[in-house]
């Protein structure tokens, strides 16, 4: 018998997931991708601020440099995705932040 009574429970209710199945980002709502990206940029900026505050206790100059990068990172996440040259700006900023982090790591 192959009626609806015999179907797999996940096939009867497509929004119900199997308990041991992990949620994939591809299954999520693509309309929320912008919100997830914005939250990731914000989380990264907060992480830089927190690390800068910790380093500030040990080395004032290095801590201030890292804390000064946090608002730049946050602002980058707020740029319009359709803006011309955004990809180049993000790439240049990521490289600059990496070089600053390397310089701070080597000098402390």
Image: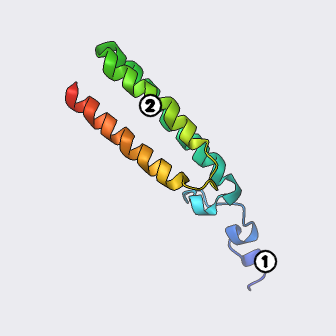
How crowded pointer 2 is (Cα within 10 Å; few <14, some 14-19, many 20+) is rated as: some
How crowded pointer 1 is (Cα within 10 Å; few <14, some 14-19, many 20+) is rated as: few
Q: Secondary structure at mark 2?
A: helix
Q: Secondary structure at mark 1?
A: helix
Distance from disc 2 to disc 1, alpha carbons, whole Å, reads: 58 Å
Percent position (x, y) of residue 57?
Answer: 34, 13
Q: Is residue 31 left or right of residue 68?
A: right
Q: Point out which mark residue 74 bears.
A: none
| First reached walking from the N terminus: tag 2 or tag 1 | 1
Percent position (x, y) of residue 58?
Answer: 29, 15
Depth order, front residue of 79/12: 79
Residue 28 figure quarter:
bottom right
Q: Which residue is mark 1?
A: 4
Q: Write the residue at 50% across / 37% down.
A: 73
Q: Point out which mark residue 69 bears.
A: 2
Q: Write the residue at 32% across / 18% down.
A: 61
The image quadrant where one finds the N terminus is bottom right
Percent position (x, y) of residue 23?
Answer: 58, 57
Q: Is residue 15 left or right of residue 67?
A: right
In front: label 2 or label 1: 2
């Amino acid at each position: 018998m192959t009626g609806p009574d015999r179907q797999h429970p996940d096939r009867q209710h497509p929004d119900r997931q199997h308990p041991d199945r992990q949620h994939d980002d591809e299954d999520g709502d693509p309309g929320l991708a912008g919100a997830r990206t914005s939250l990731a940029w914000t989380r990264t900026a907060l992480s830089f601020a927190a690390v800068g505050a910790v380093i500030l206790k040990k080395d004032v100059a290095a801590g201030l440099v890292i804390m000064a990068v946090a608002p730049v990172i946050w602002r980058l996440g707020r740029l319009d995705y359709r803006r011309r040259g955004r990809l180049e700006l993000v790439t240049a900023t990521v490289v600059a932040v990496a070089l600053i982090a390397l310089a701070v790591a080597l000098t402390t």
